[in-house]
Image (cartoon, grey):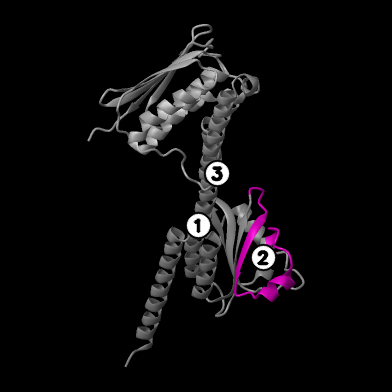
Amino acid sequence: MATRTDTDWRRRAERAEARTAALNRAAAAVASEHDVDRVLQLIVDEVRQLVDARQAALGITNRSGAIETFITSGISAAARRRIGPLPVGRGLLGALIREGESIRLASVADDPRSIGVPPHHFAISSFLGVPVPVRGRPMGNLYLTNKASGEFTSDDQDLVERFALHAGIAIDSARLLDQVQRLAVMEERDRIGRELHDSVIQQLYGVSLSLEDVPELVPEDPQDARRRVDEAIESLHGAIAEMRDFVYGLRPALLAPADLRRSLADLAEEAERGRLQHVDTYLAEVALPPDIAAELVAITREALSNATRHSEATEASVRLMDFGDRVRLRIVDNGRGFDARGRRGAGHHGVANIRDRAAGLGGRATVRSRPGEGTTVTVDIPVDQE
């Protein structure tokens, strides 16, 4: 027959096992669940049951110290509506945040920091509150009220403090994730702007150049004028298709390796239909991954566009060379040049875009130019030899 001592030990072991299991569930939720509100709700529910409290709540503060999120357990939705607005952090809740230390009371009425409760709030006798730390600073509080079996114990406090640590980790993780997502949105916005500038916008600009003298050609050479218009329509269709790729989140101009030479040659021909009188090409046969090929095409488009838009060049050359461990792309124009060491004004993002693209491939872009001496863009990209 089991003695009272045996029964007590069994109950303690069961209670310790239940608490360990609950802590493990909280830790697993923090590690795997992306919805922070669900994680915090699980923590509040678990800890309330484990310490035998009738009500529990977790308040999260913003940077100014005001409670911005309030999660409850053991309180019905109707009761919450009757209570009214969220607590403002006075009384014991404010003390938890200000002092950063746990508070355990047999009766809240006996503590001078207590200022009572709102008119429709439930009565509170016993109280256990702990700060929720985020990177060593209290960013909220987890508190429980009205222990069903009497007063909260030191063991209860130790357990609640452990759950508060998990809550702090969940809050910190959620805020870090939010920061990462906002940075990702900014980076994606910059990437799309750069891609549009380097591809669609440049393509549309090339179309506008090819159509500039069409009105004069109509009476003099209607066949050439018609050809220019047909080519412009074809280029516009290509720009529309590329814009559609952006809309659907696709990376534009993902080329098969065999298409790189053809794409660079097409860009040279397109530039000749604009203001450049001649574009010389030397294009080695190089097998490159599609992402590298796409970036080299975009760099070439940018450099040729700069030659016509800003430097007023009449001739250019495009060379693609294979050095085994790296490929080199070089675009040279005979334009008016510029001070490559100086800062460029608004609207002149081409050089920065070229350098960013090369760096994104683990390579390097150098731009040499002086006023009156033209511009040379050299891009070296390492190639993995396996």
- Viewer-nearest residue: 44 or 127: 44
| Magenta-highlighted residues | 63-91
Horizontal and vertical percent for residue 125? 64, 74
Instruction: Return the residue found at the far right.
Output: 119
Q: CA distance from mark 1 to mark 3?
A: 22 Å
Give SS at disc 1: helix
Q: Is 244 above or below relative to 332?
A: below
Give SS at disc 3: helix
Residue type highlighted by circle 2 = Asp
Is residue 245 among what the camera can see?
Answer: yes
Q: Counting other residues with Cα less than 10 Å from the Cα at mark 1, is it few (<14), some (14-19), or many (20 or more)?
A: many
Viewed as shown, does residue 280 lie left or right of 107?
left
- Which label is found at residue 170? 1
- Whether tag 3 and tag 2 are in contact, CB under 8 A, the answer is no
Q: Is residue 4 magenta?
A: no
Q: Nearer the viewer, mark 1 or mark 3?
A: 3
Q: Earlier in the sequence, mark 3 or mark 2?
A: 2
Residue type highlighted by circle 3 = Val
Q: Earlier in the sequence, mark 1 or mark 2?
A: 2
Q: Counting other residues with Cα less than 10 Å from the Cα at mark 3, is it few (<14), some (14-19), or many (20 or more)?
A: few
From the image, which quarter does the C terminus lie in?
top left
Q: Is residue 87 magenta?
A: yes
Q: Which residue is mark 3?
A: 185
- Viewer-nearest residue: 104 or 385: 385
Q: Which residue is mark 2?
A: 111
